[in-house]
Amino acid sequence: HYASAYAAPEQLRAGLEFYRAFPVDEKFGEAQQSAIDVPIVLAGGDHSMGEFNLRSAESLRKHGCANVTAEAIKNSGHFVAEEQPEIVAGLIERYASP
């Protein structure tokens, strides 16, 4: 699926723009001064983004995000929805329920 999705140069470039935007996103986040009360859940695989999400959550809190939760999805890497779909579904149900 991923090989065909990124087969053409423009598709691959578009997919990588997410990562290229990190420096701009970081500058935007550092400039953030107003409080944000919207719940934010950072969920990543414990073999990939788990530790990074913990640091990101702390940084978001320092910049005014009052309601940030970080979840490490066990036995998962970068593609958590494909690797642990039941756990991801449970997180969505837990955090999206009123």
Image: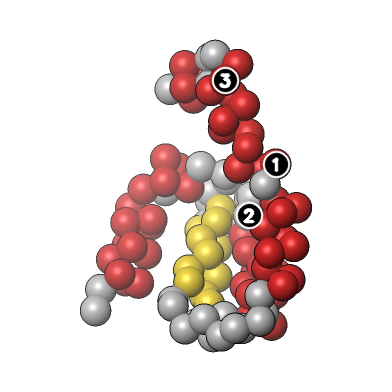
**Structure colour scheme:** secondary structure
Asked if 35 appears above or below 6 in the picture, the reply is below
Tell me the residue at 59%/24% (across/down): 12
Q: For the residue marked with disc 2, what is the amino acid?
A: Met
Q: Where is residue 76 in the image (x, y as percent from the top left)?
A: 53, 48
Asked if 13 appears above or below 72 in the picture, the reply is above
Disc with the residue nearer the chain's start (1 vs 2): 1
Q: In which quarter of the image is residue 20?
A: top right
Tell me the residue at 33%/52% (across/down): 86
Residue 75 vs residue 13: left or right?
Answer: left
Q: For the residue marked with disc 1, what is the amino acid?
A: Arg
Q: Is the residue marked by circle 2 packed among few (<14), some (14-19), or many (20+) residues within 10 Å?
A: many
Q: Quadrant of the C terminus?
A: bottom left
Q: Where is residue 63 in the image (x, y as percent from the top left)?
A: 67, 80
Asked if 41 appears above or below 47 in the picture, the reply is below
Alpha carbon distance from label 2 to label 3: 26 Å
Q: Is mark 1 on a helix, strand or loop?
A: helix
Alpha carbon distance from label 3 to label 1: 14 Å
Q: Are circles 3 and 1 on residues that touch, CB within 8 Å?
A: no
Q: Is mark 2 on a helix, strand or loop?
A: loop
Q: For the residue marked with disc 3, what is the amino acid?
A: Glu
Instruction: Read off the residue under disc 1.
Output: 20
Q: Which mark is residue 10?
A: 3
Q: Which of 39 and 9 is in front in this view?
A: 9
Tell me the residue at 62%/26% (across/down): 13
Q: Position of residue 91 (x, y in %)?
A: 37, 64
Q: Position of residue 5 (x, y in %)?
A: 47, 22
Instruction: Read off the residue under disc 2.
Output: 49
Q: In which quarter of the image is residue 15?
A: top right
